[in-house]
C-alpha cells in the first residue's frame, strides 16, 4: 500500500464490527465464499474467533481493511498443515492488502510450526485470488468439479491449493 502503512495484527473483540462489515460485504454476492448472504453475525464471529483459530486484521489509517484466519487444516495427524481464509474490503481491493496478508500468513504459519498451508476451497472463477496465491507460491493440487454453486454462473470448479513452508 503506497499511501498508508499497513499493520497486520491479531484480531481483537473490538474489531468485530469492522470484521462483520467485511464478512457480509464479501459473502453477499455469493461468488467467492460458501457462506449464504443471510449468515448470522454470531455464526460469522464464531467462525473467525473459534478456539484453535487465530484471526488477524490488516489495518491502514486506523481502519480494518482486511482479515484472515489461520488454523490447523485437520486435527491430530493432519494438524501440521495450516488452513487459511482471507477477506478484503472492497474499498481496499487492488491496494496489496490481500498479498500482504498472504505473505504475513506464510510467516505466521512458519512461526507456529506448520509445515505447509492448504486452501481447501478456492473458487476457480475467483481469478484474482487464484492469480495471487500462485504469485506467492501456492500450486493447484486438485480440482473439485462443480463443487461451488456460484450465484450467477451456476456450478463451478473449486481448486485445492498448497504451499510447502
Image: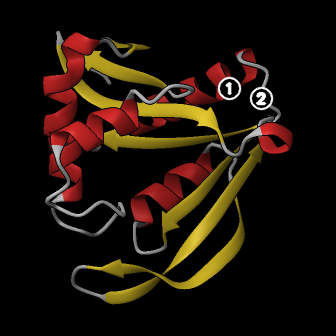
Instruction: Indicate the quadrant containing the N terminus: top left, top right, bottom left or bottom right.
Output: top left
Seen from this angle, which residue lies furthest right?
A: 77
Q: Quadrant of residue 60?
A: top left
Q: Nearer the viewer, residue 31 or 5?
A: 31
Could you classify mark 2 by the number of other residues whose Cα lies within 10 Å: few (under 14), some (14-19), or many (20 or more)?
Answer: many
Could you classify mark 1 by the number of other residues whose Cα lies within 10 Å: few (under 14), some (14-19), or many (20 or more)?
Answer: many
Viewer can see residue 70: yes
Q: Nearer the viewer, residue 101 or 24?
A: 24
Residue 114 numbered tag: 2
In the rendered structure, which disc, 2 or 1, sits on the residue that comes first in sequence?
A: 1
In the displayed structure image, the side of residue 13 where residue 52 appears, left or right: right
Please say if the residues under marks 2 and 1 sit with CB atoms less than 8 Å apart. Answer: yes
- Secondary structure under the numbered disc 1 in the rendered image: helix
Viewer can see residue 134: no
**Residue 24: x percent and y percent?**
16, 47
Q: CA distance from mark 2 to mark 1?
A: 5 Å
Q: Quadrant of residue 126?
A: bottom left
Q: Quadrant of residue 91?
A: top left
- Secondary structure under the numbered disc 2 in the rendered image: loop
> What residue sits 42% from the left and 22% below the top?
56
> What residue sits 57% from the left and 28% below the top?
105
Please give the residue where the numbered disc 1 appears in the rendered image: 109
Q: Nearer the viewer, residue 56 or 36?
A: 36
Number of numbered discs overlaid on the protein picture: 2
Amino acid at each position: 500500500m503506497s499511501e498508508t502503512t499497513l499493520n497486520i495484527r491479531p484480531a481483537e473483540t473490538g474489531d468485530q464490527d469492522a470484521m462483520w462489515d467485511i464478512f457480509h460485504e464479501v459473502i453477499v454476492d455469493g461468488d467467492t465464499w460458501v457462506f449464504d448472504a443471510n449468515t448470522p453475525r454470531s455464526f460469522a464471529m464464531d467462525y473467525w474467533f473459534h478456539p484453535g483459530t487465530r484471526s488477524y486484521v490488516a489495518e491502514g489509517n486506523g481502519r480494518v481493511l482486511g482479515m484472515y484466519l489461520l488454523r490447523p487444516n485437520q486435527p491430530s495427524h493432519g494438524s501440521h498443515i495450516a488452513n487459511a481464509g482471507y477477506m478484503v474490503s472492497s474499498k481496499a481491493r487492488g491496494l496489496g492488502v490481500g498479498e500482504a496478508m498472504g505473505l504475513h500468513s506464510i510467516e505466521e504459519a512458519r512461526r507456529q510450526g506448520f509445515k505447509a498451508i492448504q486452501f481447501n476451497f478456492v473458487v476457480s472463477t475467483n481469478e484474482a485470488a487464484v492469480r495471487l496465491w500462485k504469485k506467492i507460491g501456492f500450486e493447484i493440487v486438485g480440482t473439485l468439479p462443480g463443487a461451488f454453486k456460484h450465484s450467477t454462473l451456476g456450478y463451478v470448479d473449486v481448486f485445492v491449493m498448497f504451499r510447502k513452508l
